[in-house]
Image: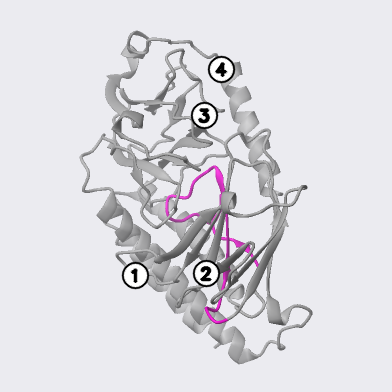
Amino acid sequence: MVTESFADAIARAERAITEAPHVRGERDLIEGYDYLAGGIRASIQMAWAYDRDFPYFVRSTGPYTKMGLDNPDTLYFHAWLRDDAEYVVTGRRGSTADLSFQILDGSYSPVGVPGSLAAFDDREVELDADGSFAIRFGPGLTGRNAFPLAPGSAMLVVREVFSDWAREEPGTLRIHRADRFGCGPAPLTEETLTRRYAVAGKMLVGRIRTFLAFAERFYLNLPVNTLTPPRLTPGGLATQYSSAGHYALDDDHAMVVTVPVAGAPYQGLQLGSMWYVSLDYVNHQTSLTVPQAKVDPDGMIRYVISERDPGVANWIERTGHDRGYVQLRWQRLSRALTEADGPRVDLVAVDDLPKQLPYHEPIDPAGWRARIAARQAATAARMLG
């Protein structure tokens, strides 16, 4: 059967879900099965895009195909490459906070993610007056907007990062192999489809096992309810720092994360579930960028992570998750961050929050509903970009 390998992979992936060490009951399993569904959709999409002669950009992750503690503020794209061919990426720069490019070697393992062979943002790209650009990738390339492909190069990842969801607009992006432009691929065969289903199965099992192990290795060994000082993000992003941790909270307590506005073009905080994916950021405020947050007069943002509504604009909703991950990111930096740029964490009783927040300004239910409506509208518009 053409689909037999993929069906077997779904069964293996389901076992990985049910055997995940953090699963405690029905709710964890329901979320796990939903995560599995997103993985199935994403793996099929990625396998059908696995064409290095006629590549195209696909969404690597999104609201319904999540993986790897995806950033709610980022559109992720990827295309497959050969390290011995030349590719041309054309497009137009939008008004988003950051646009970055990364070459990966494509290697996944239960203890790591693909190695980064090159990473840069659009500050290294010469743009035309209207924001359009053409970038060449290939072995030994030099010159304007030319970037060499190292041996082993297998995937080009592009991240477009939004800071102000309501006002920033995405750009455009496309890719082609230089010596195949104007040509077409060979007709599909049963052998090709069988191979694609097999590739999709490997991707599905690999992404679930990889990121469960990755989270356990890099997050759960940290003390609970703490965040690390800012550090260069593992994986090779050239201008991104992050602060990471995991939380465990009962419904009567909140984690207050206080962090200065660093002046970076992008700075944001998000929560993730134990499946190492973002919480619902469309219908709930589970993340905030600087433009979305209330900045206090002392230049600090005070995020309040809790299950109960504390009545503040910077409430980060747990949405029923008494355990999970916390991540702060700073991107497009022009300087190194230090511990002084990083977060302070305080555990506070929810009932005591008005006394503990120095610039407490309550928000009423109508104001909160307006914030959520704005998120829903901005996300819908962005996903059509």
The residue tagged 4 is: 365
Numbered disc 3: secondary structure: loop
Name the residue type under label 2: Met
- Nearer-the-camera pick, 175 or 270: 175
Where on the picture, by quarter, is residue 230?
A: top left
Q: Is residue 79 magenta?
A: yes
Residue under the point 38% across and 64% down? 113
Q: Nearer the viewer, mark 4 or mark 2?
A: 2
Numbered disc 2: secondary structure: strand
Name the residue type under label 1: Ser
Q: Is residue 9 magenta?
A: no
Range of magenta residues: 56-84
Numbered disc 1: secondary structure: loop
Q: Which mark is residue 290?
A: 3
The residue tagged 1 is: 109
Provide residue 123's location: percent of width, then percent of height: 58, 49
Q: CA distance from mark 3 to mark 1?
A: 35 Å
Q: Nearer the viewer, mark 4 or mark 3?
A: 3
- Nearer-the-camera pick, 185 or 284: 185
Q: Nearer the viewer, mark 2 or mark 1?
A: 2
Determine whether 6 is above or below 160 in the image. Answer: below
Binning the other alpha carbons within 10 Å of mark 3 as few (below 14), some (14 to 19) or many (20 upward) gives: some
Q: Nearer the viewer, mark 1 or mark 4?
A: 1
Looking at marks 3 and 1 on the same chain, the residue that comes earlier in the sequence is marked by 1
Q: Which mark is residue 155?
A: 2
Q: Split into 4 quadrants, where in the image is the N terminus?
A: bottom right
Where on the picture, by quarter, is residue 250?
A: top left
Q: Are marks 4 and 2 in contact (CB under 8 Å)?
A: no
Provide residue 291's location: percent of width, then percent of height: 56, 28
